[in-house]
Image (spheres, helix red, strand yellow):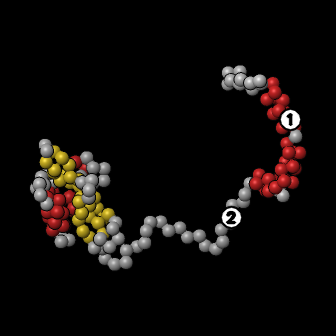
Amino acid sequence: MVDIISRASGPGPQDERLRKILTQNRGTIAKIADHLTQGGYSASQKPKEEPKPEGRIVHVLGGAAAAGPADVRIRVSINGRVVAYDAGSGRQIHHLGDLRRREGREVFVLATAANGFFAPVDPEVAAALAPFDGTALAPEGGEDRLAGDIARALGIA
């Protein structure tokens, strides 16, 4: 014989009787489970206590401080971001701008509010790099040349 149970009909009367038997005998079932697991069932049902901290609790936010002066370099990343970074730690110091394609050419766009950047560069950096804003890159070696020119303009080359 095959019983067909569908969701539309809901739980049958035999399901309700079984649920009632399990609810009424929950204590006996727990005792049997404890006996079989040597108390492991009840121990697993209890809420576990959080470990209590001992001694001082130290939260270190961020990475380690730089040991010496930063070795600043300019890099054009694969995704076209032009950044100043510390060669010792690899951390980005400034986002200077992006390389964007305009009219079939790659153009350097300085990170300023006028160009639509949310975090513009400092005014001193913007003044030093203003001549490069909107300049097109050469087809061969243009990114390296741009990085070198920006480094010289910022006085780090």
Q: Secondary structure at mark 1?
A: helix
Q: Secondary structure at mark 2?
A: loop
Q: Residue at x 23, y 60 (%)?
A: 76
Mark 2 belongs to which amino acid?
Answer: Pro
Question: Marks 1 and 2, Cα distance to the nearest angstrom?
Answer: 39 Å
The quadrant of the rendering that contains the N terminus is top right
Residue matched to label 2: 51
* Number of marks present in the image shown: 2
Where does the image place residue 21, in percent across and percent down from the top left? 86, 35
Closer-to-camera residue (64/11): 11
On screen, residue 153 above or below 134: below
On screen, residue 111 above or below 11: below
Residue matched to label 1: 21
Where does the image place residue 46, in percent across and percent down from the top left? 77, 54
The quadrant of the rendering that contains the C terminus is bottom left
Where does the image place residue 153, in percent across and percent down from the top left? 15, 66
The answer to whether residue 70 is seen in the rendering is: yes
Q: Residue at x 24, y 54 (%)?
A: 80
Where does the image place residue 8, in percent across and percent down from the top left? 67, 21
**Residue pushed farthest top?**
9
- Which disc number belongs to residue 116? none
Q: Residue at x 11, y 54 (%)?
A: 139
Q: Residue at x 27, y 53 (%)?
A: 79
The answer to whether residue 123 is seen in the rendering is: no
**Residue pushed farthest front?**
1
On screen, residue 89 above or below 25: below
Closer-to-camera residue (55/86): 86
Mark 1 belongs to which amino acid?
Answer: Ile
Question: Which sits earlier in the primary sequence, circle 1 or circle 2?
Answer: 1
68 relative to 151 in the view: left or right: right
